[in-house]
């Protein structure tokens, strides 16, 4: 049964799967939020288009086991993303602990080569896919995995800009606030 979900309230949702999982926590004018603080939030995250594409037609239960495993993956990613190029031993161990619950296999079918994902239990699939996605980003361009430079923001992003100089989670939010603060400081100085 596919998850039933409400509207996704998060301010940033178009990032790669591993970063999207990290961005299930955010801060706004109303305070700190955590989408994964309930099974309803889990259902919302699982029903998102990005997650649905990553999971394909797999039946993932909306239960406490899935939630617990996602939180384990999010904690591991949080540790690893602090220093993507040179993660500490604890970060490596935490991410590998999630990855140990599944693998990607290859086989030949009558239609040609095929790859598949095998996990210990369906509840491990979202966590494992997020950890695997992080490895993909590390292999591609680890220097483009970033935290928003707004000191009051906890969101992350993968910089796909042409010149690789993106600094904020969003130009409309944190970027606009930073520009307004600089303008105010210039006006006050003058």
Image (cartoon, grey):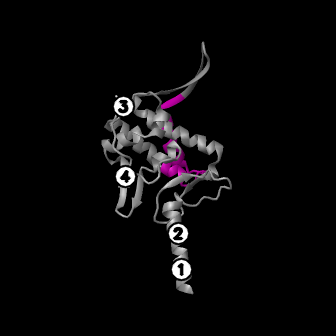
Label whose residue precedes the other's in the sequence (2 or 3) = 3
Residue matched to label 4: 34
In the rendered image, the residue lying farthest to the top is 110
Q: Which mark is residue 185?
A: 1
Quarter of image, res 4: top left
Q: Nearer the viewer, residue 137 or 65?
A: 137
How crowded pointer 3 is (Cα within 10 Å; few <14, some 14-19, many 20+) is rated as: some
Q: Is residue 79 magenta?
A: yes
Q: Is residue 60 above or below residue 173?
A: above
Location of mark 3 (residue): 2
Disc 1 is placed on an element classified as: helix
Task: Provide the residue designation for mark 2.
Answer: 178
Q: Residues within 10 Å of mark 2 (few under 14, many from 20)?
A: some
Residue 115: horizontal and vertical position, in percent?
57, 24
The reply to whether residue 100 is visible in this rendering is no
Real-space CA distance between mark 3 and mark 1, rounded to the nearest whole angstrom: 51 Å
Nearest-to-viewer mark from 2 and 4:
2
Give the secondary structure at mark 4: strand
Magenta stretch, residue numbers = 77-103
Query: Mark 3: which secondary structure?
Result: loop
């Amino acid at each position: 049964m596919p998850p039933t979900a409400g509207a996704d309230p998060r301010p940033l949702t178009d990032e790669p799967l591993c970063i999207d999982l990290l961005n299930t926590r955010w801060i706004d004018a109303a305070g700190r939020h955590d989408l994964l603080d309930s099974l309803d939030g889990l259902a919302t995250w699982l029903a998102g288009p990005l997650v649905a594409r990553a999971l394909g037609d797999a039946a993932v239960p909306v239960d406490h086991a899935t939630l617990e495993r996602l939180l384990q993956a999010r904690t591991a990613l949080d540790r690893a993303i602090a220093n993507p190029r040179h993660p500490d031993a604890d970060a490596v161990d935490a991410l590998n602990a999630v990855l140990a619950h599944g693998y990607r296999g290859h086989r030949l079918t009558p239609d040609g080569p095929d790859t598949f994902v095998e996990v210990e239990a369906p509840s491990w699939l979202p966590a494992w896919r997020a950890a695997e996605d992080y490895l993909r980003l590390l292999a591609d361009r680890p220097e483009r995995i970033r935290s928003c430079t707004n000191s009051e923001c906890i969101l992350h992003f993968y910089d796909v800009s042409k010149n690789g100089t993106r600094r904020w989670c969003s130009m409309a939010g944190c970027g606009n606030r930073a520009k307004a603060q600089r303008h105010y400081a210039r006006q006050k100085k003058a």
